[in-house]
Image (spheres, rainbow, N blue to C red):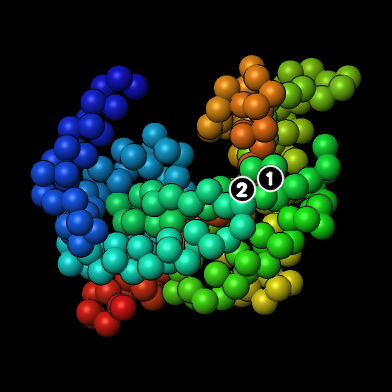
């Protein structure tokens, strides 16, 4: 892990030296070396499952245009209530937008996959974002903390948390589709249970952060094609 982190830092330093503006960043990520960086960062960040299945490496110019376009998507995403928004790298080494909703954004009763009514404000705004950006593919991921279930072994609790995270992710997908988001735009809905914690599960505050739903907007094949043709705005 230390070696991997060192590789990431070295490659990131190279990108910084190439320029800090978004166009330079997109170009670097789109290049062959950037594809390697994307794979490493994706493994560390847990987002290697995010990204269109492209047959060949995406070129530097294409990556630059997608980076600029995703900056616009991110700016729109920041208006979604209770979403933590950041730019991350997908499996192709391309810039994508991650929205994270913890319990203040998307709420479920304990042990339940039924959406709380208060969650629908954020989800309605998210649905509008997705419908406005139909050239973005979408991945929805559910996570839990590592709390055990009553009368269950550790292994049984882990499996129940995995199942619950899948059900919660599916609840979000179903609701977004009910609000008019195309079923073909949401490319994956996956629960990861206790995997990829973002905080310390030994504290109540950490557990609350780990109980979350992550939504990724990433370049679809149509967006990649438009960028390659130079028509992506």
Q: Is residue 52 left or right of residue 211?
A: left
Contact between labelled residues 2 and 1, with CB atoms less than 8 Å apart: yes
Q: Quadrant of residue 53?
A: bottom left
Q: Which residue is mark 2?
A: 101
Percent from the top left, x then y, of residue 84?
Answer: 53, 48
Label 2 element class: strand
Percent from the top left, x then y, of residue 10?
Answer: 18, 32
In depth, the one of 144 and 124 nearer the eye is: 124
| Residues packed near mark 2 inside 10 Å, few (<14), some (14 to 19) or many (20 plus) | many
Q: Which residue lies most toward the right here? A: 151
Q: Which residue lies most toward the left here? A: 17
Quarter the N terminus occupies: top left
Percent from the top left, x then y, of residue 201?
Answer: 62, 22
From the viewer's perspective, is residue 10 above or below residue 154?
below
- Is label 1 or label 2 in front? 1
Name the disc covering residue 175, or none.
none
From the viewer's perspective, is residue 159 above or below residue 54?
above
How many badges with numbers are in the image? 2
Q: Which residue is mark 1?
A: 104
> Which residue is depicted at the point 39% across and 57% down?
96
> Which residue is depicted at the point 55% across and 27% down?
199
> Which residue is depicted at the point 81% across and 52% down?
116
> Which residue is depicted at the point 55% across and 69% down?
129
Label 1 element class: loop
Percent from the top left, x then y, of residue 95?
Answer: 34, 56
Query: CA–CA distance between discs 1 and 2?
Result: 7 Å
Q: Is residue 218 visible?
A: no
């Amino acid at each position: 892990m230390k070696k991997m982190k060192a590789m990431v830092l070295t490659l990131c330093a190279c990108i910084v030296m190439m320029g800090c503006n978004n166009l330079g960043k997109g170009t670097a990520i789109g290049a062959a070396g950037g594809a390697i960086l994307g794979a490493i960062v994706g493994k560390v960040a847990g987002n290697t499952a995010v990204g269109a299945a492209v047959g060949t490496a995406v070129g530097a110019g294409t990556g630059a245009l997608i980076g600029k376009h995703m900056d616009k998507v991110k700016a729109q995403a920041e208006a979604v209530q209770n979403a933590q928004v950041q730019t991350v790298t997908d499996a192709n080494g391309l810039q994508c937008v991650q929205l994270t909703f913890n319990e203040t954004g998307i709420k479920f009763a304990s042990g339940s996959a039924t959406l709380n009514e208060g969650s629908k404000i954020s989800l309605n705004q998210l649905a509008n974002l997705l419908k406005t950006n139909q050239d973005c593919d979408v991945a929805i991921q559910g996570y839990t903390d590592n709390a055990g279930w009553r009368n269950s072994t550790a292994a049984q609790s882990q499996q129940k948390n995995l199942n619950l995270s899948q059900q919660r992710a599916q609840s979000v997908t179903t609701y977004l589709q009910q609000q008019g988001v195309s079923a073909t735009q949401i490319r994956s809905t996956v629960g990861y249970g206790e995997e990829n914690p973002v905080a310390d599960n030994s504290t109540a505050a950490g557990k609350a952060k780990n109980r979350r739903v992550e939504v990724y907007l990433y370049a679809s094949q149509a967006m990649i094609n438009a960028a390659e043709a130079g028509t992506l705005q």
